[in-house]
Amino acid sequence: MTPKIRALSVHLLTATGAVFAMLAMLAAVDARWDLMFLWLVVAFIVDGIDGPLARHYDVKKNAAEFDGVLLDLIIDYLTYVFIPAFALFKSGLMDGWTGWFAIILITFTSAMYFADTRMKTKDNSFSGFPGCWNMLVLVIFTLEPNFWVSLALVTILAVAMFLPLKFVHPVRTERWRVVTLPVAIAWTFFAGWAAWVDFHPESWAHWGLVITSVYLLGAGVAQQVIPERTAKA
């Protein structure tokens, strides 16, 4: 297999995320929230592995006719933002004006954030909350908090998208990656299990989701507060 074919294969893998997004949307239209999130978890897994493969096979050099970054952003907007916002609104978990407020805020701020050329920091983390609304909405579906709590979380994270706060990339942020990557994998497992059991209120996956979500949200800010140790000469 030539380098070009390998690189093109990575682009094709990334593009499958669009298919999973459509399957998730079809499930959402039918209010099959468990199935919708299962497809979103599959898309999340693809998003987690295509980046390292793209860098390994140097797609920018070997398949330069396709813009992998643009392809990834298009699919991420569907799976991370658009479909989760639709589900949050149609599920009734945020009823009345709060639902309208949430979907407008989520889709509008995320569109601006995804187009922001300053979204990545020098250590390959994200500057501001990276629009991972799929993660927040899944936790809301799982825990079903009071809609005021959900409204507060949506508002705080929407504002956090444009604050000088760091949020780790589970794969690309090297600092604490030995912890962050396993936590991200654990979150994916807990999310898949919660959806598989149709968000059963007594599922043990709930606590796992809460703990891993808190870490993934707070690790980057903690790194800003805790100075990094420099190697001694």
Image (cartoon, helix red, strand yellow):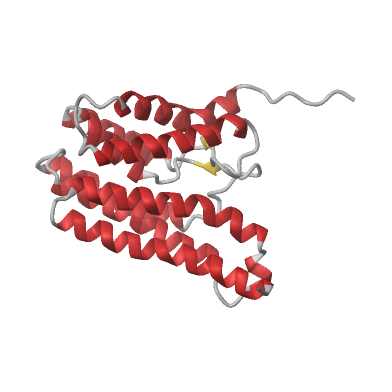
Q: Residue 233 versus residue 166: which sits nearer the camera?
A: 233
Residue 223 left/right relative to 209 = right
Which corner quadrant holds the C terminus?
A: top right
Residue at horizontal 59%, vertical 28%?
Answer: 224
**Residue 154 seen by the camera:** no
Residue 223 left/right relative to 207 = right
Could you tell me how many numbered marks the image carries? Answer: 0
Place residue 231 in its image quadrant: top right
Residue at horizontal 40%, vertical 31%?
Answer: 213
Q: Position of residue 9 (x, y in %)?
A: 55, 69
Residue 49 left/right relative to 196 = right
With respect to residue 98, does 80 lie above or below? below
With respect to residue 99, does 229 lie above or below? above
Query: Among all residues in the image, which is located at the extreme bottom?
Result: 65
Q: Position of residue 227 (x, y in %)?
A: 67, 23
Residue at horizontal 45%, vertical 45%?
Answer: 130
With respect to residue 75, does 38 lie above or below? above
Q: Residue 25 versus residue 155: which sits nearer the camera?
A: 25
Q: Position of residue 138 (x, y in %)?
A: 29, 39
**Residue 143 seen by the camera:** yes
Which corner quadrant holds the N terminus?
A: bottom right
Q: Position of residue 137 (x, y in %)?
A: 28, 40
Query: Among all residues in the image, which is located at the extreme front?
Result: 1
Place residue 171 in its image quadrant: top right
Place residue 195 in its image quadrant: top left
Query: Among all residues in the image, which is located at the extreme left?
Result: 96
Residue at horizontal 30%, vertical 27%?
Answer: 206
